[in-house]
Image (cartoon, rainbow, N blue to C red):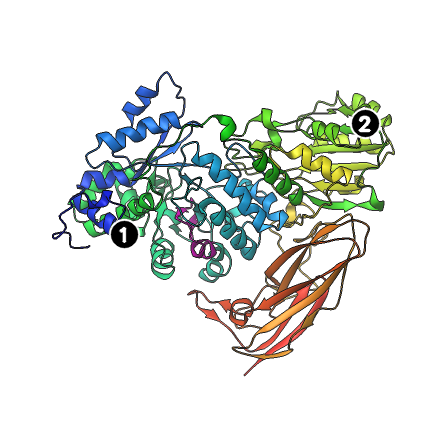
Amino acid sequence: MTDLSDIKDRSLYKNPAFSIDRRVDDLLARMNLEEKIYQLNQYTLGRNNNENNIGEAVKNIPAEIGSLIYFETTPELRNSVQKKAVEESRLGIPILFGYDVIHGFRTIYPISLGQAASWNPELVEDACGVAAQEAFTSGVNWTFSPMVDVARDGRWGRVSEGYGEDPYVNGVFAAASVRGYQGDTLSAKNKVAACLKHYVGYGASEAGRDYVPTEISKQTLWDTYLPPFEVGIKAGAATVMSAFNNISGIPASANYYTLTEILKKRWKHRGFVVSDWDAVKQLITQGLAANEKEAAWYAFSAGLEMDMTDNCYQKHLGKLVKEGKVSMEAIDDAVGRILRLKFELGLFENPYTEILPDDKRFLLPSSLNVAEQLAQESMVLLKNNKGVLPLKKGYKIAFIGPMANNRLHLLGSWSAHGNEKDVVSILDGIRKEKGFIKKNILFADGCGFDGNDQRGFAEAIRVAEQADIIIACLGEKKTWSGENASRSVIALPRIQEELLENLKKTGKPLVVLLSSGRPLDLSRIEPLADAMLEIWQPGITAGIAVAGILSGRYNPSGKLPITFPYTTGQIPIYYNHRKSGRTHQGKYQNITSEPLYSFGHGLSYTKFEYGTLKLSSSKIRRGDTLRAEIEVKNVGNYDGKETLLWFVADPFSSITRPVKELKYFEKKEIPAGESRIFTFDINLERDLGFVNEDGKRLLENGIFYIMVKDQKVKIELID
């Protein structure tokens, strides 16, 4: 700690002319133990509050509290509590206000899984910038986002919150999100601190069930689950949230190896770790701690600085310090990390949020434009037989199904302060689309999302028979994915499949729109459909984006960031699996062992023709540079965007490698009749190497393959 004895100004920490480190040291030197422990706790504010009981809410919050989860959309209550902290606490330390801003604050854009399907990190960065602006002007300084858990089990509800099954993809979007939320400077207006979650291995939950233990080898931890977090830390993520899961016997929220050895010592992260909701107390039910006091000791000693909501730190850390089980040095380090972020955010200089009208904060035209672009780029054309899509002008079109005129469920889970009234439904979107005649747009619900009520079938068939083409709008409710939303089967409820079977009998062309928060089992739906479009849960501009794709105003460009299994029984199924011993055996006896739609699948209205994959050299040595390139030509009739995925395969290695691994991707717009060159500059150690169980990176001589689509080119690393 800095020697402050020669400093005449005893309010150094209040002076922005000094470095943040000196200000932190000065403030720590003035704090007593009780004040320090308060900084390590997070409470909630804004639930069931209104303007008539703001005073009571303020009264109930300790002025010294470190952080609050803020559930309101206006700054008034937040500023009232902040005023208490700044003016009534002894040292005037401002409160850090956080909230779950996952895929938008009021302008809700697609769920994270859909964002990954866009393969457009720059656009995702823009969307996170919109979310940061709306959150900041509402009094929130810190978002519990992005989630970068690699997830390979569609039964897990939280698969919707992350970027799919691939570590590299999760890392790219982690960095993009951090840049969008935080900008170049945390203290800048309209920026908030990001929080990488859930650290680590939460996506490996057994059988897709939330909160359950995970069994992860150290090599797999380093190889699969840690990389997105490391990329996010290098991108400057201010904070990290610990996970609920038990990692091979040691819960993530009390895991010294991951929280301190890796995060703080190896990666040099200077920010802090916050627990997930009640996660410290849950160390008891996980069988690690016998009581709350032990739970507080385990979590804090492992490197978890802030306790979210369960109050274990507040009740027990003081006793643990007095008993000598927790050192003041450790307390100061933890508190210092939290204070540093508050200084970086500029909260000491600007503790209050400006009060602006809603039309200056929410749903700005530029924000809606970003949401629409991201929604349409995220949608994946799974199937399009005989060019059924885009729709022909002048057609009578029957929109049928529970999602056709629904708004609420298009928001998806964790939709923050998204308002159903702001959502453009699919039906409204197509009615407003240029070139379509309103009287030619027909509609029937047909059935609900679930249940057994078929009374709407007859009306649906009657409407369908009047049309030239049927658009069946099916999908999941928003509550069917997200936290604590595990499902044993990922097929749609039988009532929706039965509706589709009845519509098929009309003999009309049948297009299926799918809105979901996960990959779906489409084994009974796919044979019935002439075309299928996965729209995910696309947010408030849903109908506009869908209408643009159906009409051909937008050419679909999304590709799957997660495998769609043939049936639920194939799970877990993912592209980058390790090789098996008997490739001719080990297959399912009653179904195919192949997925219905593989990672990276996605069609376009145009056709892209790939040239020959070329490498700058076929034999390389350590230290060499290597470039791969390929020409892609748009030989169709529509302008389109194509995403090229670059894979590497290492056929023989001392630690066996997956059949192929994504190492780079790039999305480019290619006008009809034109070509673009895609290049991949290969870093040998990064792209051809691998890690062992200690996280050490290895690069071994031998044969490698660079792969694009159905092309595979061999290279050799030699001495």
Q: Residue 572 in the image: x percent, y percent?
A: 60, 51
| Farthest residue, direction top | 52
- Who's the residue at 59% across and 61% down the image? 664
Under tag 2, what secondary structure? loop
Front in this rendered view, residue 321 or 353: 353
Front in this rendered view, residue 557 or 692: 557
Point out the stretch of residues depicted in magenta: 229-247
| Quarter of the image where one finds residue 387 | top right
Front in this rendered view, residue 349 or 29: 349
Whether residue 625 is visible to the viewer of this picture, yes or no, is yes
218 on left or right of 719: left
Q: Residue 629 in the image: x percent, y percent?
A: 67, 67
Under tag 1, what secondary structure? loop
Q: Confirm or deny contact between disc 1 and disc 2 (CB under 8 A).
A: no
**Is residue 640 depicted above or below 110 in this figure?**
below
**Residue topped by disc 2:** 437
Q: Residue 317 in the image: x percent, y percent?
A: 23, 42
Q: Residue 447 in the image: x percent, y percent?
A: 71, 25
| Quarter of the image where one finds residue 683 | bottom right
Q: Any mark on residue 80, and which?
A: none
Residue 234 covered by magenta stretch: yes
| Farthest residue, direction front | 17
Spatial distance from mark 1 to mark 2, Cα to Cα? 64 Å
17 on left or right of 244: left
**Residue topped by disc 1:** 19
Q: Amino acid at mark 1?
A: Ser
